[in-house]
């Protein structure tokens, strides 16, 4: 992270003495493409129009146990509080859809584990931040050559701080907000977002028009009815939240709806017509360890050591082995192959974690009630 110098904190556009920011933005977009980003845009650092929606979402408790969302709401709502002097946001998106993403087949085979497509390969946080850092270095080089008295200060992000990522993507014209609340484009939504907050007064891009129209496929496809209205997701019902963010027990009434999804959920993207035009993702996010089609029983057999070793460099590691077993236990309880599921579950009946034991007992009870 680059710290801002105190002399940049009072920076204004007028300090730049006729510098050609239009030409700079053109260069930034070309450099970004060279770094593999599919699209870049520029937004002003103002999210005041959308802040009331965030506050309402928090008031309704729809963030569940993601206390950091409430704790850092002010930082999210006021970019200049997070990084003093911020005037503009450079946004970027990087596609991640792996080549062999046979989603429907895996979702339809209850012996296999479904893992959200973004998590099948390497962790995106570092990859995107490293590329944005390279982009920032090039901007810095350009500014240095111009012998301006004002300096360039910045900080790069990718899902790594309280930043309104989708809103900045929308404002910078690289996406619109789909009714599933994700950033959507004419080439779909399988992309990561990244941002550079900067003190440069860059000219913002125009918004693009929205193309959800009368479609409500994502609302209808959500297995847990978590999209409670267009553009409104109640995280407490969302499988991504339940399998990744939630630390404690998964609500019993939602467990059967989770199916074989053990880390995240893609259903609201899989059904989206715009994803028929999706580009393949960056090679950096290729599938590792066969995670796109491995059996639940195999993944459930991994001990903590195997979990840590095999998922080195994967975003999945952040949930830890206990939540991993909790999630797979639920999926095994929902599995069709009861004999194999039952045998796998029985191996964890005495697991040291009460959370795991309780989910294992629930899963075994599901299987026995199905077979009786
Ligand atoms: S990720 Fe899954 S559970 Fe969450 S809103 Fe989308 S479809 Fe619903
Ligand atoms: S499924 Fe339809 S409504 Fe939902 S995000 Fe895609 S286009 Fe928009």
Image (spheres, helix red, strand yellow):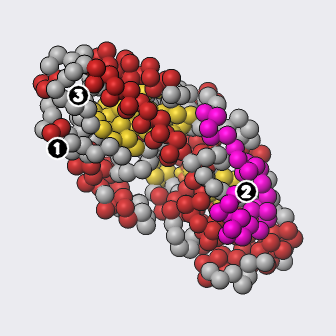
Magenta-drawn segment: 282-310
Judge depth for marks 2 and 1 and give the one in front: 1
Labelled pair 2, 3 in contact (Cβ < 8 Å): no
Magenta span includes 289:
yes
Q: Mark 1: give few (<14), some (14-19) or many (20+) Cα within 10 Å.
A: few
Ranked by sequence position, the earlier of labels 2 and 1 is 1
Q: Residue at x 13, y 26 (%)?
A: 15
Quick one: 186 or 168, which is closer to the camera?
168
Beta carbon at label 2 within 8 Å of ligand 1: no
- Marks 3 and 1 sit apart, C-alpha to C-alpha, by 17 Å
* Local SS, label 1: helix
Could you tell which of marks 2 and 3 lies nearer the N-terminus?
2
Give SS at disc 3.
Answer: loop
Q: From the viewer's perspective, is 44 left or right of 307?
A: left
Instruction: Tell whether position 249 is magenta.
Output: no
The image shows residue 329 at horizontal and vertical percentages of: 70, 70
Work out whether 166 lies above or below 64: above
Locate residue 268: give its quadrant. Answer: top right
User: Which mark is on residue 113?
Assistant: 2
**Separation (CA) of disc 2 from disc 1:** 51 Å
Q: What is the number of callouts on the image?
A: 3
Compared to 140, does 96 lie above or below? below
Q: Which residue is mark 1?
A: 6
Between circles 2 and 3, the one closer to the viewer is 3
Q: Which residue is mark 3?
A: 201
Give the residue at x 24% y 34%.
199
């Amino acid at each position: 992270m680059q710290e801002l110098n105190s002399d940049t904190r009072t920076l204004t556009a007028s300090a730049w003495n006729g510098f050609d920011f239009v030409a700079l933005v053109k260069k930034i977009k070309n450099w970004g493409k060279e770094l593999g980003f599919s699209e870049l845009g520029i937004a002003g650092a103002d999210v005041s129009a959308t802040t009331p929606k965030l506050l309402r979402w928090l008031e309704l408790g729809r963030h569940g146990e993601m206390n950091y969302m409430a704790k850092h709401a002010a930082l999210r709502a006021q970019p200049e509080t997070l990084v003093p002097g911020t005037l503009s946001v450079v946004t970027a998106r990087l596609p991640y859809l792996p080549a062999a993403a046979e989603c429907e087949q895996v979702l339809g085979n209850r012996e296999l584990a479904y893992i959200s497509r973004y998590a099948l390969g390497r962790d995106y946080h570092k990859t995107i931040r490293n590329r944005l850092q390279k982009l920032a270095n090039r901007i810095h080089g350009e500014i240095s050559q111009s012998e301006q008295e004002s300096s360039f200060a910045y900080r790069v992000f990718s899902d790594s701080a309280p930043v309104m990522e989708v809103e900045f993507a929308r404002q910078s014209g690289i996406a619109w907000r789909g009714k599933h609340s994700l950033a959507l484009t004419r080439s779909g939504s399988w992309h990561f977002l990244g941002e550079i907050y900067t003190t440069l007064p860059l000219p913002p891009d125009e918004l693009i028009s929205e193309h959800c129209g009368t479609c409500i496929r994502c609302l209808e496809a959500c297995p847990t009815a978590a999209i409670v209205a267009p553009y409104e997701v109640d995280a407490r019902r969302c499988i991504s939240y339940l399998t990744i963010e939630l630390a404690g027990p998964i609500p019993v009434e939602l467990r059967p709806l989770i199916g074989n999804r053990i880390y995240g959920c893609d259903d609201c993207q899989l059904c989206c017509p715009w994803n028929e035009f999706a580009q393949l993702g960056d090679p950096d996010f290729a599938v590792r360890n066969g995670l796109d089609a491995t059996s639940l029983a195999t993944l459930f057999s991994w001990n903590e050591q195997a979990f840590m070793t095999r998922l080195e460099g994967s975003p999945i590691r952040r949930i830890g082995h206990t939540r991993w077993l909790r999630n797979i236990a639920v999926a095994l309880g929902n599995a069709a192959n009861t004999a194999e599921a039952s045998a796998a579950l029985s191996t964890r009946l005495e697991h040291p974690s009460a959370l795991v034991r309780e989910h294992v007992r629930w899963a075994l009870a599901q299987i026995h009630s199905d077979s009786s």
